[in-house]
Image (spheres, rainbow, N blue to C red):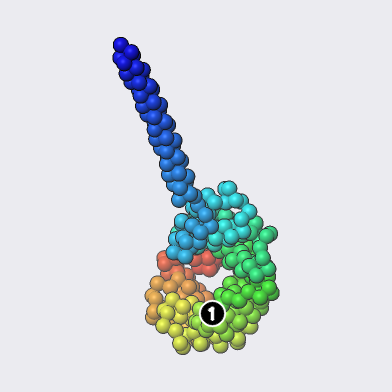
């Protein structure tokens, strides 16, 4: 009897110990599972977290859309991080110039400009000239898509970049175009001439010719136009050069050479409204109004809103 009670007591104790061990094991399993899940989700969050390394990697892959999206997310938590601001601004710029939709391009440029200006506040002396250069370019492109004028700001920041030692081959050409947009022909010629020393092109030669014409220096303009016409295989640029040369001859009352240039344009492109208009002006100067009106009507058939032809026909 005593043995029976003793055995029952031993069994109870064994069951108690066994249950206790089971509880402990269950606690360990639960804690282990919680720990594993915590470790997993922490690592997962770290993997998904956007860092400067993430942004830089996208930049090195020329994935400007990813730089833009990751940069925007990163800047929400770190709004004044200079490195992120720089990458983000540059991505905005490249996305803008690749856009066909001018409203989207303008939005990207606005973001670019705003963030570049913030980045400049805390930029190192070595980075600042590069930021000024990019800001000057951003204002240049903003000027091409906006109804407002930004050429003065483009000039300001491109010149600041130059003064602070930044070197880029395209700065003189951007300056030349910006000065031209502001109606400053001599400053434009100076900048274009500097660009010509870096890389000669017929487009630059024509741009210089245009500015000399606007500055009423016809002889200098003609010399550059001759170079374009003689060397160029681009029909469109040759036409523009011959039209400008024809207009110069018209001003000089050299009707024979003016007509020759306009007819040369028509040999390349019979649908040149400017050439027909110019020939009409020659007839007008020679007193043949009937032929002049016929040429102006031809110009309007090709280009219904040709300003010169419209004005001439309304006056005559």
Image point (40%, 72%), residue name: 271
Query: Can residue 271 be seen in this snapshot?
Result: yes
Q: Which residue is mark 1?
A: 204
Q: Position of residue 53 (x, y in %)?
A: 51, 59
Q: Quadrant location of residue 100?
A: bottom left
Please say if 32 is above or below 137: above
Q: Is residue 10 left or right of residue 200?
A: left
Q: Quadrant of the N terminus?
A: top left
Q: Quadrant location of residue 276?
A: bottom left
Q: Position of residue 298 (x, y in %)?
A: 42, 69
Please say if 37 is above or below 177: above
Check disc 1 and report its element: helix, strand or loop.
helix
Looking at this rendering, what residue extends furthest in the front direction?
2
Q: Along the line of sight, which residue is nearer the eye, 13 or 111?
A: 13
Q: Position of residue 257 (x, y in %)?
A: 50, 86
Query: Neighbour class for label 1 at 10 Å: few (<14), some, many (≥20)?
Result: many
Image point (49%, 66%), residue name: 306
Please say if 12 is above or below 211: above
């Amino acid at each position: 009897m005593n043995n029976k009670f003793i055995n029952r007591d031993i069994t109870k104790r064994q069951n108690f110990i066994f249950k206790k061990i089971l509880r402990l094991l269950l606690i360990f399993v639960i804690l282990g599972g919680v720990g594993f899940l915590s470790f997993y989700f922490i690592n997962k969050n770290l993997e998904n977290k956007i860092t400067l390394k993430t942004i830089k990697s996208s930049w090195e892959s020329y994935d400007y859309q990813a730089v833009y999206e990751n940069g925007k997310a990163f800047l929400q938590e770190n709004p004044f991080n200079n490195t992120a601001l720089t990458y983000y601004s540059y991505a905005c710029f490249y996305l803008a110039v690749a856009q066909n939709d001018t409203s989207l391009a303008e939005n990207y440029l606005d973001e670019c400009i705003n963030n570049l200006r913030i980045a400049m506040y805390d930029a190192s002396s070595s980075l600042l000239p590069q930021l000024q250069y990019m800001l000057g370019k951003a204002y240049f492109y903003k000027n091409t898509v906006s109804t407002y004028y930004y050429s003065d700001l483009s000039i300001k920041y491109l010149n600041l970049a130059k003064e602070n030692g930044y070197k880029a081959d395209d700065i003189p050409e951007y300056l030349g175009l910006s000065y031209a947009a502001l109606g400053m022909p001599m400053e434009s010629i100076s900048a274009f001439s500097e660009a010509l020393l870096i890389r000669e092109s017929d487009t630059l030669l024509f741009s210089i010719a245009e500015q000399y014409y606007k500055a009423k220096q016809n002889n200098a303009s003609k010399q550059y136009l001759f170079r374009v016409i003689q060397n160029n295989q681009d029909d469109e640029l040759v036409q523009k050069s011959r039209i400008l040369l024809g207009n110069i001859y018209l001003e000089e009352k050299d009707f024979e050479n003016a007509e020759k240039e306009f007819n040369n344009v028509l040999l390349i492109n019979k649908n040149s409204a400017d050439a027909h208009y110019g020939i009409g002006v020659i007839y007008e100067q020679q007193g043949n109004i009937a032929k002049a009106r016929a040429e102006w009507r031809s110009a309007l058939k090709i280009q219904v809103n040709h300003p010169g032809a419209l004005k001439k026909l309304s006056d005559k």
